[in-house]
Amino acid sequence: MVCVVLCFGANAQMMSNDTIHHHSAVIVTTEKNNPQNTSYEVMKAMYEANGRHFQDPRAPRFLFLDRKGRVALGIGGYVKGTMSIDMGGIANSPDFITATIPAPPQPDMRNQFRMDASTSRLFFKLVGRNKVVGEFTVYIESDFRGSAAGYYGMRLRQAYIELWRLKVGRTWSTFCDVAAAPPTIDFQGPSGTVLTMNTVLQYVQPMGRNWEMVMAVETPSATYTTHQQYCDAIAQRVPDLPSYIQYKWDEGRSHIRLSNLLRLLSYRNLVADKNQYAFCWATQLSGVIQASRHFTFYMQGVYGRGYGSYLNDLGGYGYDLIPGERSGTMVAPYALGLVGGVQYTIRPGLFVSAAYSQCRLYDQPSLSASAYRYAQYLVANAFYSPFANCQIGIEYLYGSRHNYDGVSGSAHRINTMIQYNF
């Protein structure tokens, strides 16, 4: 048995979106022949970069190939350290979640200092091909936000299998267009972004060179605001049904996507002593357009009812269903999310970006006067790669939260980051 180690180039090319090309990889194989000739398609699948969130790990630094060059195992991730300072009001969370901004402002909550490394990542990616299913991918990824109090416990983020046209496992929801989210140091991202992970069974149907349609069945996740004596949350009985149709061009670097989501959320009507359902839906238009060598534009616009768990600012705060006007009933409130951003690449490895976002909740007269009504999120940042596989960044964030009674609060944050990819 012969072990061959090949290194494709001494330096990685860092693009404006932090894509690492395959010639930076170190490859270990037991094949006597040159694996670069026998495994090109496997390598290409391993280093596919389109359709990822800005914070998703990029190409692995190390590869292991089998004897015939038909299966490759990549090991990678990054170590990321951040430092933040809040001034003139705070977002009361490690991430800049505008829903957590105190409204009205609290005199004792106007400044804070934080340092964090819990968003570092580790992943394993297996890519191969066989005669039965063709190309397949097995992927598992973790970060270190597993313990609630101080974080730093390992947490599963993604774990899925792709084969033929199917994807099965935990990953970004089909309703999310993660590539259309503007780049941020902030782990949370813009308030109006559709961004969540589900357990999915997804089917992809290509339609020619530039079009594709995707449909999925996903495990529902929802949180309610209830009146315990009138209504209550129960286990969900119907899966979420997201889908989209997408047009892409420029080798997949640009796309426009129309997404839809159907939900049937169940709850217990304690007055009538029976289970009932609320029909929910949402529609999203999103995309990323690489207009030139320097300019890239990001956009997302979503509207619907009963999909709070999918929105950055509303997820986990009980806004999928809220009490209705009649005792015992629950209704799905309407919500709106808007995101617009631009990125300017000064040169490879150096770019600046800015984005604005708004999240708005409607139809909440049954909630208290201090309930969330809408929030705004503004970000401006710069990223620079001083050498291969390393990236540093600085970012300014402004956010404001507005309650149903008109009371509001705001916060400012300066974020800095250093990240090393491996």
Image (cartoon, helix red, strand yellow):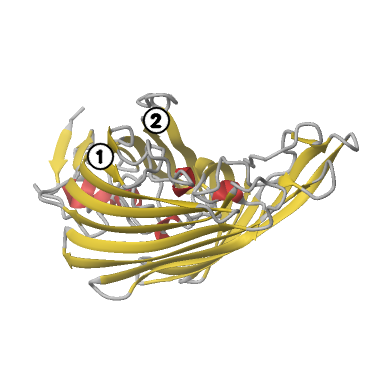
Identify the residue at image location x=18%, y=31%. 3
Q: Quadrant of residue 155?
A: top left
Q: Residue furthest bottom?
A: 292
- Quadrant containing the N terminus is top left
Name the residue beneath numbered marker 2: 145
Q: Quadrant of residue 27?
A: top left
Q: Is residue 238 left or right of residue 197?
A: right
Query: Residue 7: where, in percent of width, then height?
Result: 13, 43
Identify the residue at image location x=69%, y=44%. 239
SS of the residue under disc 1? strand
Which is more N-terminal, label 2 or label 1? Answer: 1
Query: Residue 230: where, in percent of width, then height?
Result: 81, 36
Q: Callout 2: few (<14), some (14-19), or many (20+) C-alpha neighbours within 10 Å?
A: some
Name the residue beneath numbered marker 1: 82
Whether residue 232 is visible to the viewer of this picture, yes or no, is: yes
Query: Residue 188: where, in percent of width, then height?
Result: 41, 46
Question: Mark 1 belongs to which amino acid?
Answer: Thr
Q: Residue furthest right?
A: 272
Q: Is residue 302 left or right of residue 326?
A: left
Q: Nearer the viewer, mark 1 or mark 2?
A: 1
Identify the residue at image location x=51%, y=71%. 208
Measured in 3D between alpha carbons, the distance from the residue under mark 1 to the one under mark 2, in whole angstroms, is 14 Å
Q: Callout 1: few (<14), some (14-19), or many (20+) C-alpha neighbours within 10 Å?
A: many
SS of the residue under disc 2? loop
Question: Mark 2 belongs to which amino acid?
Answer: Arg
Query: Residue 228: where, in percent of width, then height?
Result: 76, 32
Q: Residue furthest front?
A: 107
Q: Give whichever of 291, 126 is nearer the camera.
A: 291
Q: Give whichever of 319, 124 is nearer the camera.
A: 319
Identify the residue at image location x=37%, y=59%. 378
